[in-house]
Amino acid sequence: MAGFSERFIPNFASIVHPLRQQLKENIWAWDEKCQEAFTKLQASLSEFSLLHHYVIGHDTELVVDANITGRGAVLVQRASKTEAFHPVMYKSRSQKEVETRYSATEREALAVRWACRKLRKYLLGAPKFRIVTDHRPLTYMFHKLCGELPPRVDNFVMDVQEFEYEIVYRPGKTCIANYMSRHHVDRAGSSRVFEIETAAESVVESGCCHALNEQGTVTVEDIRAG
């Protein structure tokens, strides 16, 4: 994930130098310089300037990944093919106990359905976007007719029929959602976070509606001002 965003982080090479040195040594030695570099990198990845607001009409990709313990997704956009993709939103969560017993294909298909639902307010009705997966079988399965797939996967495919998308394969080593699926939010401890996020979204949405009713347009500054 850091590698994907390095072009947006000033002095990226200098920040991660102590961490890169760990890859060259046979003995793992995590010292204060490594911890400082790790902390700076975390702060850089979470800066507001790194995340961009969603713009309808921009080239959009939804990158998804899943494993036995969790799943993750990253929504990215770019204004043109000559520009780099910017992250818009990160999502992750842990698997339910029953989901840990799914096959790899079922988990990856579930991740696609889950990500589309989580980001539905951005993707529904938007121009055609790409769903990026590191699980090649999905590129065939999500183009099959209903009833031609295993029942569970068939249900997941049917659930995303309302979206206009194409699904493409990219190797796992280039999947930026890989980190999110392996560092997911624990469902047991996320109820309070969910309550806060829901309340915040309600405030933002009401603010947007009020601004639209009053002046017809709304900007990021309007939302921040409430």
Image (cartoon, rainbow, N blue to C red):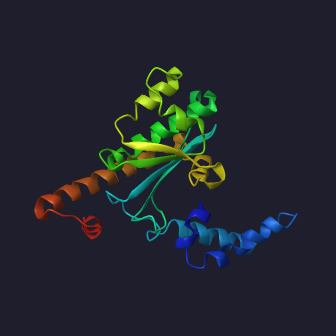
Q: Residue at x 59, y 49 (%)?
A: 170
Image quarter of residue 57: bottom left
Query: In the image, 99: left or right of 17?
Result: left
Image location of residue 225, percent across then percent down? 26, 69
In the depicted structure, whether residue 15 falls above or below residue 170: below
Q: Above or below — where is 135 with respect to 79?
A: above
Q: Is residue 11 above or below residue 100?
A: below
* Rendered position, 12 above or below 154: below
Left or right for 142, reference 162:
right
The N terminus lies in which quarter of the figure? Answer: bottom right
Figure disc tally: 0
Residue 137 x/y as whole percent:
59, 35
* x and y, in percent, of residue 25 in the image: 85, 67
Given residues 184 and 82, the one toward you in this image is 82
Q: Quadrant of the C terminus?
A: bottom left
Task: Say which residue appears at 74% left-offset and 73% top-offset.
Answer: 18
Q: Residue furthest right?
A: 26
Residue drawn at 66 percent across, 53 percent down: 173
Q: Return the residue nearer the eye: 37 or 125.
A: 125
Instruction: Tell me residue 130's x, y (percent).
Output: 45, 48
